Image: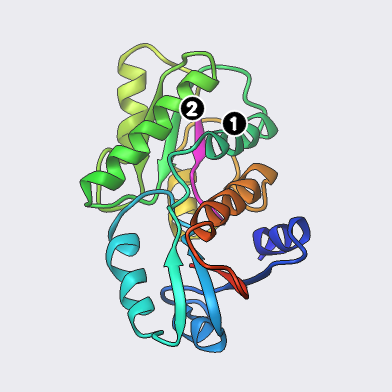
Amino acid sequence: MALLRRVRAVRRSLRVELGHLETDEPLLGDTLARLRGEAVLVPLLFGRGYHVKHDIPSVLSRASHLDATVAACLGPHPLLVEALYGRLLEAGYRGGAVVLAAAGSRDPESAAGTRTTAAMLSHRLGGVPVVPAYASAASPTVAEAVELLRSHGHREIALSSCFTAPGFFATRCAEAAPGIVAEPLGAHASLARLLLHRFDRAAAALPVRTLHRAAA
């Protein structure tokens, strides 16, 4: 994973491991089983939805051999906005409305976080409309957000991809976009800085002896 390699390169003294909640390997539980001492889990998630509130704590509860804590998720945060902004510019964005595409969650707190990120991105772009949209579990969809913007007279509409990597949801959103599509955030330097910022804040609360970071 490119983001993992970048974080390791930035903080060479830190052991950085990856763990997935489902589907891909290594699974988070397997990663935690290999660690000893203290660990900080930094969720590679952009809002406080079900994965952050339930899935990660559930896996962590089965790793009683670790003195571990869970850092804050990635959004909202100015560094996330910088990564989104950078990917838009790389895609050729020069102005116009934006749809901020995210995975989606039924959790109201997660949706509120996405709306906050959209507002912050709008400010970073000089006040252009930025409408959040979702690949699943919430509305509007990307197509619905595009139609909303068109109904208000916007013709140039770009898609900002609030995903860590290409995948089913990112592809679904990109296919519904009418214009410029920014790449997923991947190994963007601002995203790597954000991961380490979340780690540092959470690690400060632990009595440090041998500290690992596991990204979920």
x and y percentages locating residue 64 in the rendered image: 39, 85
- The answer to whether residue 58 is magenta is no
Q: Amino acid at mark 2?
A: Leu
Left or right position of 113 against 44: left
Find disc 1 in the rendering and name its residue.
85
Residue drawn at x 42%, y 15% as measured from the top left: 154
Query: For the residue labelled by badge 1, is the local secondary structure a helix, a strand or a loop?
Result: helix
Find disc 2 in the rendering and name its residue.
121
Q: Residues within 10 Å of mark 1 (few under 14, many from 20)?
A: some
Q: Amino acid at mark 1?
A: Tyr
- In the rendered view, would you say 57 is above or below 35? above
x and y percentages locating residue 193 in the rendered image: 64, 47
Query: Quadrant where the N terminus lies?
Result: bottom right
Residue drawn at x 55%, y 57% as measured from the top left: 199
x and y percentages locating residue 34 in the rendered image: 56, 88
Q: Would you identify the image quadrant in which residue 86 lies? A: top right
Instruction: Report the span colored magenta.
Output: 158-165
Query: For the residue labelled by badge 2, is the local secondary structure a helix, a strand or a loop?
Result: helix
Callouts 2 and 1 close, C-beta under 8 Å: yes
Give the mark nearer the N terminus: 2 vs 1: 1
Considering depth in this image, is 81 or 23 the residue closer to the camera?
A: 81
Considering depth in this image, is 139 or 32 the residue closer to the camera?
A: 32
Residue drawn at x 22%, y 52% as measured from the top left: 106
Residue drawn at x 23%, y 51% as measured from the top left: 107
Q: Residues within 10 Å of mark 2 (few under 14, many from 20)?
A: many
CA gap, disc 2 to disc 1? Answer: 7 Å
